[in-house]
Amino acid sequence: MKDEAQGAIRAVGLRATRQRVALLAALLASPKPVSAEALAKRLDGELDLTTAYRALAELTQADLADRIVLPEGPALYEAMRPHHHHLVCRLCGRLEDVSMCLPSTLTSQVLAKSDFASVEDHSLEFFGLCMKCAKKR
Ligand SMILES: [Zn+2]
Ligand SMILES: [Zn+2]
Ligand SMILES: [Zn+2]
């Protein structure tokens, strides 16, 4: 994982600092999105929370990581995989990947009615109840 992380960071023109490599390797190794706190804890001793937040912001900026903002609790981070969205359970926080995307006509319609020259990216999460939580109601 460390080699993969190091290569990915260099490929986008960032310096492969020890902290960035450790964080990205941890994200690549994680099957689920994780909070900055959990990452800092997992990398105990390698970096503190402030450094983790700064390095995660840099990785997100460089499109190596995704930042998922939830209605409650801390933002979660995941390694950039193919572009995708999320279904999030409002009660238990269960998170599911959604591989479908917005129709491209929506982007052109949004753009046509705006003062923007281009749309480069978007984020989209769906909030609701997972099956388990829906049954408990
Ligand atoms: Zn749920
Ligand atoms: Zn995801
Ligand atoms: Zn999309």
Image (cartoon, grey):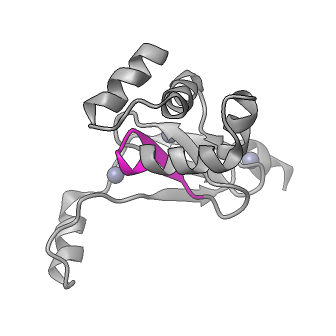
Q: Position of residue 30 (x, y in %)?
A: 59, 26
Q: Nearer the viewer, residue 63 or 9?
A: 9
Number of numbered discs on residues? 0
Taking the spot 40% from the left edge, 43% from the top edge, the residue there is: 84
- Is 52 covered by the magenta stretch? no
Q: What percent of the width, then of the height, locates residue 81?
A: 39, 33
Which residue appears at 52% of the width and 28% of the height?
A: 18
Q: Residue at x 66, y 36 (%)?
A: 47
Q: Quadrant of the C terminus?
A: bottom right
Left or right position of 135 against 21: right
Q: Position of residue 26 (x, y in %)?
A: 58, 26
Measuring 65% from the left and 45% from the top, which residue is drawn there?
36
| Residue 46 placement (x, y as % from top left) | 67, 29
Between residues 64 and 96, which one lies in front from this camera angle?
A: 64
Give left or right: position of 78 versus 117: right
Above or below for 92 versus 29: below
Magenta highlight range: 60-69
Whether residue 86 is visible to the viewer of this picture, yes or no, is no
Note whether residue 39 is visible: yes
Residue nearest the observer in this picture, 127 or 9: 9
For this orientation, the residue located farthest to the right is 136
